[in-house]
Amino acid sequence: MTMSQEEEKMLMAVLKSNCDVFAWSAQDMPGVDPGFMCHQLFVDEQARPVAQKKRKMGEEKREAVKQETRKLISASFVREVQYPTWLANVVMVRKANGKWRMCTDYTDLNKAYPKDSYPLPSIDRLVDNVAGFTFLSFMDAYSGYNQIRMHPQDEEKTAFITDKGAFCYKVMPFGLKNAGATYQRLMDNIFKGILGEDVEVYVDDMVARSQCMEEHCRALGRVFGILREHQLRLNPNKCSFGVRAGKFLGFMLTERGIEANPEKCWAITNVRSPKSIKEVQQFMGKVMALARFISKSAEMSMPLFVTLRKGGKFAWTDECEEAFLRLKAMMATPPVLTRPKPSMPLYLYISISDNAVSSVLIQEEEGEQRPVYFTSKVLQGPERWYQKIEKAALAVVTASRRLSPYFQTFNITV
């Protein structure tokens, strides 16, 4: 369903009146006031600085490093540094479009300071909070991490080596282990008044959601006002406004509910039968990422789990092939999961077998049972010898742990 001309006119008016919150280049980014938020490393005073030896690169990568470094200098993201005590190599990673992304190997530096335990939001909670709305706007900051300054005393610790010398970051780069926590802390601080109401944020992924366009434009206006106040800029090429569906944290969110990401489903349905233990592990990793959509996933996958337990010996049996094909068929048409309504109760159905316990959380609406979440667990050790009533209890315990936010919020009948 497309938006009406009136809805489109309202949305365009909001975007045009807030065009200053978009950056078309790094020069358009003033950056967050370092007095409000900056990234500090807190390196252990007893840690011994490590200067990595420069690694050799092919000509294509060396040229890419030169170009990327030139861009960083032009954007005032880095500065040249002499006699750094900490020094890291750059690592070039090929992007999907064929271009190069320059990363920095901060392995040694990351070992020298404590992990920031600032919590990230629950992905399941955010996905539930965004699904089921009529209008969605997906926003991405322009080089988000780089809009936060490094603490001056830690700048030179981020030094990296190139053919043209050593440079250090003036802004927070990718690769530092606490960068995600710092960014989430910033987002939680600036959006604290509207989180869960107008917008949901997971690190640098932002989504505004509303049921009508008038309400959506007001929500966007509040989001833009906060971004402007804190000098954060959006990347117009990575934003979508007023859409009916979009990808968020690995899921496809629509007005209907939560759907499996088609690209992830394709990666399962179009793969050939595994030829090695590693390929079985890769396939199972893809399946487990979408286990929320698969009824009795552990029970269905049991032959594949048995194969992985055989101490590195690969044996692809008829049972493995049958399970493999069932999982592929399941992901060819995965169910649409509903966003549970707080005013309505939930029901938990459990299933037990010799090797696994499973459950599905559902909500009834207009006489129709709609799935919210599937869970499944392979029985381990003595659990396999439990009596039926004990397995049923284990299924409930497993579901209550995995789905604790639902148990804390809803009345659930087992």
Image (tube, grey):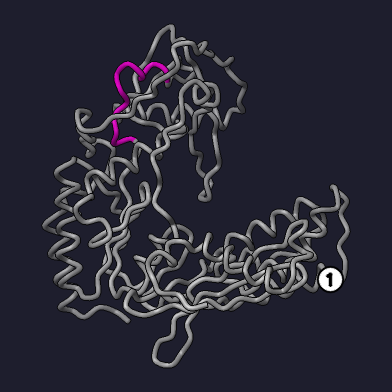
- The rendered magenta stretch, by its main secondary structure, is classed as helix
In the figure, is residue 303 to the left or right of 361? right
Within the magenta stretch, is there residue 152?
A: yes
Please indicate, yes or no, whether residue 265 appears anywhere in the rendered image.
no
Q: Which residue is found at the position 30% from the left and 30% from the top? A: 75
Identified by mark 1, the residue type is Glu
Q: Quadrant of residue 174?
A: top left
Q: Position of residue 305 (x, y in %)?
A: 76, 59
> Height in image: 333 above or below 400?
below
Within the magenta stretch, is there residue 352?
A: no
Q: Which residue is found at the position 47% from the left and 14% from the top? A: 86
Residue nearer the viewer, 37 or 94: 37
Magenta span: 146-157
Residue furthest bottom in the image: 367
> Height in image: 204 above or below 38?
below
| Crowd band around label 1 with a 10 angstrom C-alpha radius: few (<14), some (14–19), many (20+) | few
> Height in image: 310 above or below 94?
below
Q: Which residue is found at the position 44% from the left and 12% from the top? A: 45
Q: Position of residue 168 (x, y in %)?
A: 39, 20
To which residue does mark 1 refer? 319
Q: Position of residue 276 (x, y in %)?
A: 82, 53
Q: Secondary structure at mark 1?
A: helix
> Height in image: 317 above or below 341?
above
Q: Position of residue 295 (x, y in %)?
A: 62, 74
Q: Which residue is found at the position 11% from the left and 57% from the top? A: 17
In the figure, is residue 275 to the left or right of 59? right
Residue nearer the viewer, 22 or 367: 367
In the figure, is residue 132 to the left or right of 346? left
